[in-house]
């Protein structure tokens, strides 16, 4: 009855053909044993045109049926239930007349009870309740029993064959009264020209079975209506009461009933009598299959799900808990009938409703998870530490929230905070993972795989939900059992609340169950991969999953969790009737809307394309067919644009010219800057024609000055910059009477901006003394910072005042430098203090962007990486070497590698253990360090390497992974693989 059938193979019937008996031709057809030959014979117009009114037709086409033994026959016309019983122009069989009489008896009984049993008004309610339960059991259990056995054992048709009720041995003369009666009833039902013996027993059995269905279904509905009227008449209330609540109750109740009528009518127009009367339990239509049109495209099993919403409309109109619970009872029996009888038969006849995408999702789950992750508490494995820890945390949280938090307001604040914190964290992680794969980068940084990252995400996501759910249900329990709803007192409001509680409990439980069904359907459709947002963390190219699924619940709704996913919290709100839960429900709803709108949808568009994401769901498709196709907003937008153009037609041309100029200027700058973040790299000779004031900074009394000797200048902004790792050479001029322990430090401007008179932060080793021998350690040895002093104690006389100054040259290189991009400055300090005498001009340290050749190599794990001889690989290695060489070699050891392609130096350096190089650099100064100092300096070097790699390639590598790789060759291989993985994720 819930199955929509598509009639695909039908044949044209010619018009204006004579009518005469078809029995002889049908006999000739039955002589053929080949079903295809029979069908071809039926295609003969001379056979089909003999009675235009006998067979089922659709736009002048005849529909065929096929039995289990492949007998093919044209299906005669039949009428629907209402037409058969109540249309006066359709001839009634004796069984139909008996049905109408029995239906009329219900109304007679109702009138009799109203007239003569007014002393006991509840008697009619008991009477019709009893008979409604009887007919409902007859429907769901009686008809269910017959159809179940017919589906599995051909019970009905075999019984009729055994009893020889259709008399197939004697066409013209029945053997007994029963055969004669059945023949007359069937001919009355279909038409006088109908020949019983010319149609298979399966079809005749179905026609006879329809009489039983007409009796039970019409009695079921009629008795229910009588029960509704009986209950309403006993309430002694006016249906059209004036209160606002009653007005809404009336509107909603009538809307439910009208919607129910539309569902039934639309469903019948689609499935016709064949599916309405479960025809596929007896025979099949030729080449038919399930379709989803109309209401079947909006709701799953609409005849049994949304098709009973009118019952709840009657419950609202009568304000009766009896009608409500009777309706729920009938609805549950209907679902029992659906899942125990009808759905197994549909799956057997038409196949399991498993789409290709569902099969792919199951394969993805099996490929990703060796053991399925914990989902709430399912898939629990005691030997898995995360599972045991999750259960322990939730158990302790339950005990603490039950026993330690006695104030519901405090528990509400904790629950709200947990929900907000978890929602914001999920929003942040998913949003950044979609944009720049930040979550995956953390795992790749420490040499973990994407699967490791995804599995840990599953644990975190599940644990976060469990924490929020636990706090929410504990709060609901306390609100329900420790507030005024369940306390007995004499307050009228509480009495009303207590009386309304069964209704709120029913609605709330229904919402919670609907939410659970939605979640189960989502998991069945998307798998654990989809439930845990797998396409945010794993590249789809690894799983051959390019398309969004449109099966299961996603056939009807594009984002079912937007509406159905929040029903549980609203159900708890209705049950508890608590302001706490109303706030929680609003937060839940807002979070769901924002997450879908600003995280899920943009990510889906990026992965699958806007066409797939914006495709209409079943509900949207059908509503667009019903509602007028008027796009108001599009018309307003179009009108607004046209008005703007009419007001200022040149504005668009002007904006285009400005846009083109910006593009041209930008392209010129980009061509000059090449791989730099911004600005241009100028020729060294350019500094000769630039005002020297750009490089010199003086104190207020002009006694102290700092001058850059090798800084580059941006020709546009006139700002100073230097490439990372390049030494900074300065010239200073100071009075002869200066302090011996003056020193110059290198700082980030963002850290020193609080004061220009005194430096408030330590230099962390980025400093050089003005005089070479001015600082010594505890062992009376010169400290390594003195190595930055090139020349000191040069005496120079000023040109104007014949005053003498000291001049010196310092060089910040290697460990004295910062290997991070940013804006920096030099500060001259007085006598080993942090008092500032002069601050240099600000300058920027730039890091060249290095392109990683990761797109054209099919690499998944760095362990599987094989050496690839490729020019792009060699160029990449040269770029990395040029970037890092300032860390490993002194100025004298540097070479020009701009033209190096595969020189011995490049190959040797790439395969040399850079950990050993770093240790050699540490010991270059012939100073003795203990193991902790060596480890500390090694960590600093590795941190510099990591920062350089991150700034130049946008990929983070941890110190531990650098130690593991040991050589630049291994490091380059790893970067290529990580780039490939991140590229796959971002596609």
Image: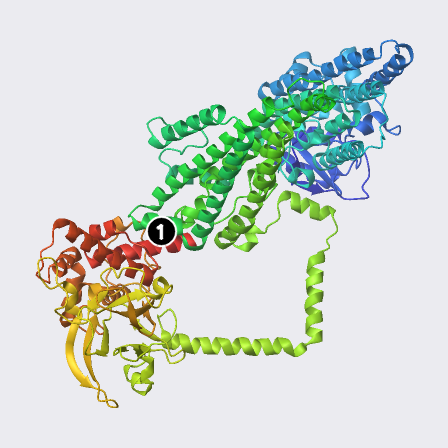
Closest to the observer, 144 or 666: 666
Q: Residues within 10 Å of mark 1 (few under 14, many from 20)?
A: many
Q: Is residue 570 left or right of residue 966?
A: right
Closest to the observer, 489 or 375: 489
Q: Position of residue 26 (x, y in %)?
A: 71, 30
Q: Is residue 789 above or below residue 776?
A: below
Q: Position of residue 720 (x, y in %)?
A: 34, 75
Closest to the observer, 586 or 670: 586
Q: Position of residue 110 (x, y in %)?
A: 86, 16
Q: Is residue 171 left or right of residue 775?
A: right
Q: Is residue 970 above or below residue 486?
A: below
Q: How is the image coloured?
A: rainbow
The quarter holding residue 901 reads: bottom left
Name the quarter where the N terminus is drawn: top right
Q: Position of residue 881 (x, y in %)?
A: 22, 65
The quarter holding residue 528 reads: top left
Circle 1 — which element? Answer: helix
Q: Is residue 287 left or right of residue 867?
A: right
Residue beneath label 1, please? 441
Name which residue lies at 80% across and 41% down: 17
The quarter holding residue 226 reads: top right
Name the quarter where the C terminus is drawn: bottom left
Question: Residue 450, can we see it?
Answer: yes
Instruction: Tell how many labels.
Output: 1
Residue at the bottom extreme?
A: 800
């Amino acid at each position: 009855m819930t199955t929509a059938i598509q009639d695909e193979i039908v044949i044209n019937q010619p018009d204006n053909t004579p009518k005469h008996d078809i029995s002889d031709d049908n006999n000739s057809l039955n002589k053929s044993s080949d079903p295809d030959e029979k069908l071809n014979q039926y295609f003969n117009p001379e056979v089909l045109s003999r009675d235009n009114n006998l067979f089922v037709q659709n736009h002048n086409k005849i529909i065929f049926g096929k039995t289990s033994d492949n007998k093919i026959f044209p299906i005669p016309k039949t009428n629907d239930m209402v037409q058969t019983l109540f249309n006066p122009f359709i001839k009634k069989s004796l069984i139909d007349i008996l049905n109408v009489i029995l239906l009329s008896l219900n109304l007679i009984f109702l009138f009799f009870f109203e007239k003569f049993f007014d002393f006991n008004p509840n008697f009619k309610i008991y009477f019709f309740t009893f008979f409604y339960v009887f007919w409902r059991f007859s429907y769901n259990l009686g008809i269910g029993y017959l159809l179940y056995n017919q589906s599995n054992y051909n019970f009905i048709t075999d019984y009729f064959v055994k009893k020889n009720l259709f008399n197939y041995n004697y066409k013209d003369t029945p053997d007994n009264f029963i055969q004669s009666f059945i023949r007359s009833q069937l001919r009355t039902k279909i038409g006088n020209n109908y020949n019983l013996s010319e149609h298979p027993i399966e079809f005749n059995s179905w026609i006879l079975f329809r009489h039983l269905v007409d009796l039970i279904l019409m009695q079921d509905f009629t008795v229910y209506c009588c029960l509704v009227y009986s209950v309403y008449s006993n309430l002694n209330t006016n249906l059209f009461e004036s209160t606002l609540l009653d007005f809404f109750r009336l509107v909603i109740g009538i809307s439910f009933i009208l919607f129910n009528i539309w569902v039934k009518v639309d469903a019948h127009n689609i499935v016709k009598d064949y599916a309405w009367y479960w025809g596929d339990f007896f025979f099949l239509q030729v080449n038919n299959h399930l379709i989803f049109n109309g209401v079947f495209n909006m709701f799953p099993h609409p005849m049994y799900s949304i098709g009973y919403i009118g019952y709840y409309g009657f419950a609202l109109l009568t304000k009766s808990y009896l009608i409500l619970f009777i309706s729920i009872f009938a609805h549950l029996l209907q679902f029992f009938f659906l899942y125990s009888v009808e759905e197994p038969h549909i799956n057997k006849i038409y196949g399991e409703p498993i789409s290709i995408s569902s099969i792919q999702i199951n394969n993805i789950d099996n490929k990703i998870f060796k053991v399925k992750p914990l989902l709430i508490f399912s898939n629990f494995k005691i030997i898995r530490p995360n599972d045991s820890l999750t259960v322990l945390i939730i158990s302790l949280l339950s005990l603490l929230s039950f026993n330690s938090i006695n104030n519901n307001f405090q528990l509400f604040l904790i629950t709200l905070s947990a929900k907000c914190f978890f929602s914001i964290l999920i929003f942040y992680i998913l949003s950044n993972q979609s944009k720049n794969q930040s979550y995956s980068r953390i795992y790749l940084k420490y040499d973990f795989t994407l699967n490791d990252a995804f599995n840990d995400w599953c644990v975190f996501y599940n644990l976060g939900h469990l924490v929020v759910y636990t706090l929410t249900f504990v709060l609901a329990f306390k609100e329900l059992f420790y507030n005024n709803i369940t306390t007995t007192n004499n307050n009228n409001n509480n009495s009303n609340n207590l009386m309304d509680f069964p209704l709120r409990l029913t609605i709330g439980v229904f919402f919670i169950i609907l939410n659970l069904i939605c979640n189960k359907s989502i998991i069945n459709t998307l798998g654990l991969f989809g439930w845990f947002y797998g396409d945010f963390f794993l590249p789809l190219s690894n799983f051959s999953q390019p398309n969004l699924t449109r099966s299961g619940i996603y056939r009807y709704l594009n984002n079912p969790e937007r509406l159905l996913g929040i029903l549980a919290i609203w159900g708890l709100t209705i049950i508890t009737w608590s302001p706490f839960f109303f706030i929680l429900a609003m937060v839940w709803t807002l979070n769901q809307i924002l997450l879908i709108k600003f995280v899920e949808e943009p990510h889906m568009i990026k992965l699958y394309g806007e066409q797939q994401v914006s495709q209409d769901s079943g509900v949207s498709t059908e509503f667009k067919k019903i509602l007028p196709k008027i796009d108001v907003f599009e018309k307003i937008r179009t009108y607004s644009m046209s008005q703007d153009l009419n007001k200022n037609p040149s504005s668009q041309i002007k904006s285009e010219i400005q846009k083109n100029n910006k593009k041209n200027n930008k392209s010129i700058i980009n061509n000059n800057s090449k791989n730099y973040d911004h600005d241009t790299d100028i020729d060294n000779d350019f500094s000769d024609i630039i005002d020297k004031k750009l490089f010199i900074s003086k104190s207020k009394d002009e006694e102290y000055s700092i001058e850059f000797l090798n800084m580059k200048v941006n020709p546009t902004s006139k700002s100073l910059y230097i490439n990372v790792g390049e030494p900074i050479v300065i010239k200073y001029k100071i009075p002869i009477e200066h302090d011996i322990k003056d020193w110059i430090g290198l700082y980030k401007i963002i850290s020193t901006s609080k004061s220009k008179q005194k430096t408030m932060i330590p230099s962390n080793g980025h400093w050089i003394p003005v005089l070479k021998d001015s600082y010594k350690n505890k062992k009376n040895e010169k400290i390594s910072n003195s190595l930055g002093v090139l020349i000191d104690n040069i005496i120079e006389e000023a040109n104007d005042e014949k005053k003498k100054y000291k001049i010196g040259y310092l060089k910040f290189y290697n460990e004295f430098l910062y290997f991070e991009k940013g804006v920096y400055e030099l500060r001259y300090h007085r006598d080993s203090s942090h008092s500032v005498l002069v601050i240099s001009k600000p300058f920027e340290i730039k890091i060249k962007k290095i392109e990683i050749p990761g797109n054209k190599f099919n690499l998944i794990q760095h362990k599987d990486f094989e050496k690839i001889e490729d020019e792009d690989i060699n160029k990449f290695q040269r770029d990395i070497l040029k970037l890092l060489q300032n860390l490993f070699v002194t100025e004298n050891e540097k070479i020009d590698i701009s033209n190096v392609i595969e020189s011995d130096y490049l190959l040797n350096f790439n395969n040399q253990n850079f950990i050993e190089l770093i240790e050699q650099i540490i010991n270059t100064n012939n100073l003795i360090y203990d193991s902790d100092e060596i480890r500390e300096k090694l960590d600093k070097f590795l941190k510099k390497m990591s920062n350089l790699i991150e700034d130049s390639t946008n990929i983070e590598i941890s110190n531990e992974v650098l130690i593991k790789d040991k050589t630049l060759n291994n490091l380059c291989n790893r970067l290529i693989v990580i780039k490939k993985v991140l590229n796959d994720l971002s596609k």
